[in-house]
Image (cartoon, rainbow, N blue to C red):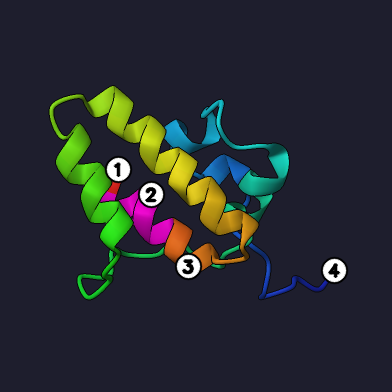
């Protein structure tokens, strides 16, 4: 009988389609996002000035806004800020 690890991440296939197929994230970025035990919920208390700027500036162009949000989330992932990256992606999702 095999033991299952309760700390296993959700896996890349469980990521939202727009994240999984983004041409901005590398495999490593996707692994970081997929390593959470559950897809997080939007945190209404999450405050980020750069995120607010992206939403304000790109609100009329959803495709461009998604690209900018993915670029910003990528930067956060490269800094090891996985929770923050998730919040950026969830707000834009």
Task: Tell me the magenta residue range.
Answer: 86-91
Residue 55's spot in the image, x, y percent?
21, 44
Q: Which residue is mark 3?
A: 83
Q: Nearer the viewer, residue 38 or 64?
A: 64
How far, Cα to Cα, is label 4 from label 3?
31 Å
Closer mark to the observer between disc 4 and disc 3: 3
Of callouts 3 and 2, which one flags the residue occurring earlier in the amino acid sequence? 3
Residue marked by disc 1: 93
- Kindly report the secondary structure that dominates the magenta region of the rendered protein: helix
Near mark 1 (Cα within 10 A), the count class, few <14, some 14-19 or many ≥20, is few
Q: Secondary structure at mark 2?
A: helix
Residue 88, magenta (yes or no): yes
Q: Please name which of the two marks, 1 or 4, marks the residue nearer to the observer.
A: 1
59 left or right of 41 in image: left
Residue at point 13%, 27% (across, down): 60
Q: Residue at x 42, y 32 (%)?
A: 18
Q: Is residue 11 magenta?
A: no
Q: Find numbered disc 1 in the image and state the secondary structure of the residue it sits on.
A: loop
Please tell me whether residue 93 is drawn above or below residue 39 in the rendered image.
Answer: above
Secondary structure of residue under mark 4: loop
Camera-nearest residue between 12 and 50: 50
- The 10 Å Cα crowd at callout 3, few under 14, some 14 to 19, many 20 or more, is some
Height in image: 34 above or below 38? above
Residue named by callout 2: 89
């Amino acid at each position: 009988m095999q033991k299952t690890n309760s700390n296993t991440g959700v896996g890349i296939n469980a990521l939202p389609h727009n994240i999984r197929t983004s041409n901005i994230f590398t495999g490593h970025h996707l692994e970081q996002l997929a390593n959470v035990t559950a897809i997080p919920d939007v945190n209404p208390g999450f405050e980020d000035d750069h995120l607010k700027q992206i939403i304000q500036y790109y609100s009329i162009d959803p495709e461009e806004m998604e690209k900018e949000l993915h670029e910003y989330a990528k930067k956060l992932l490269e800094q090891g800020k996985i929770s923050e990256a998730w919040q950026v992606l969830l707000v834009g999702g």
